[in-house]
Each structure stands twice: as C-alpha cells, then as structure tokens.
Image: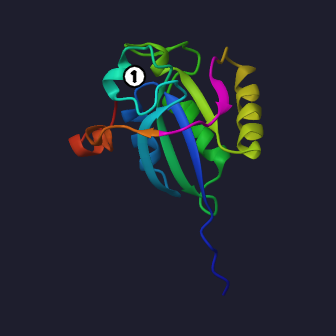
Amino acid sequence: MESKTKKLQIATFGGGCFWGVEEAFRTTKGVKSTEVGYMGGSMRKPTYEDVCTDKTGHAEVVQVTFDTNEISYDELLEIFWEVHDPTQLNRQGPDVGTQYRSVIFFHNKEQEKIAKKSKELLSKKKNIVTEIVPASEFYKAEEYHQKYLMKRGENVC
C-alpha cells in the first residue's frame, strides 16, 4: 500500500473579523493549522491598535496551512465565500473599515487562477467586491486573537 506524502500549502483570506473566519477554517478537515494576522498594508509589524486606525492598509486575515491530499484550494474558497458577505465593501456586519475588506491573497499562479475563476462564477449571481491580490508579508496578530472563539467556547464572530 502506497502512503501519500503530505503536500502542504498556505492560503490567506480576509473576510471581516478574523475570529469567525479562523474558526470556520480551523475546524475543517484537511486544515493543519490557522493563524490570524494582518496583510496587505504599508506598516511593518503592525499591532491590532495600528490596524484598527484604518490607516495602515492591512486587512485582518487568516493564514491557513492545508494538506492538498485532504482538501483542495477550491474547497477552501467555498468556505471563504460562505463565512462572510463578499458583496459588502470594506465592512462585515457592524465592523467597518478597510481592515475588514473581503480579500483573497494568493501565494502562487495556480491559486490566483482558481480564485479568479471562483469569483467570476459567483459574480454571475451577486456583485462581488472581493479583491484578489498577491500575498505580501504576513504579520501574526497578538496571541489573544489566536483561536479566539475556541478559547472562549464560542462559534460566531
């Protein structure tokens, strides 16, 4: 019997408050780890307080490490589209600002191609405002944000 070697990849998504988005991915089979943080801005090593000013350009994101033998990037995108409202510009629910924007940060050309096709299909039904841009430096958020809902025993942001 041939064993499959783990083939790990990273995916990064911003869909508003990172707590609920992280929880959705953290509990998904094939996802090996999640970290919340900040991406897409101009300031080096931003803090939560910096990002909340809406002046750094960063989005709250979830960085997902997944095994492609267990889950595909397409399947991660399906979860992403379901856990937030990609029709809202720079907001999710009561959270307003560019840090809460809907964004897919791709890590390679294949992710870019898949993300753009997925958005195109969804755009036939809704006006999708989600950005699809190259991944930049990821800054891990403060420890109290990591697995926040799991630590509190909650399951929604």
Q: How far across and how far down the image is residue 92, in percent? A: 45, 18
Quadrant location of residue 126?
top right
Q: Residue at x 50, y 26 (%)?
A: 84
Query: How far across and down, in percent of the image, does residue 4 sit?
Result: 64, 75
Question: What kind of residue is marked 1?
Answer: Val
Magenta span covers which residues?
129-138
Is residue 27 visible to us here? Answer: no
* Residue marked by disc 1: 51
* Quadrant containing the C terminus in the rendered view: top left
In this rendering, position of residue 85 left or right of residue 27 = right
* Image quadrant assignment for residue 54: top left
x, y (%) of residue 18?
Answer: 41, 32
The image quadrant where one finds the N terminus is bottom right
| Residue 2 picture location, percent across and down | 67, 83
Residue 78 can be seen in this image: yes
**Residue 127 within the magenta-colored segment of the rendering:** no
Considering the whole magenta stretch, tell me its main secondary structure.
loop
Q: Residue at x 39, y 42 (%)?
A: 23
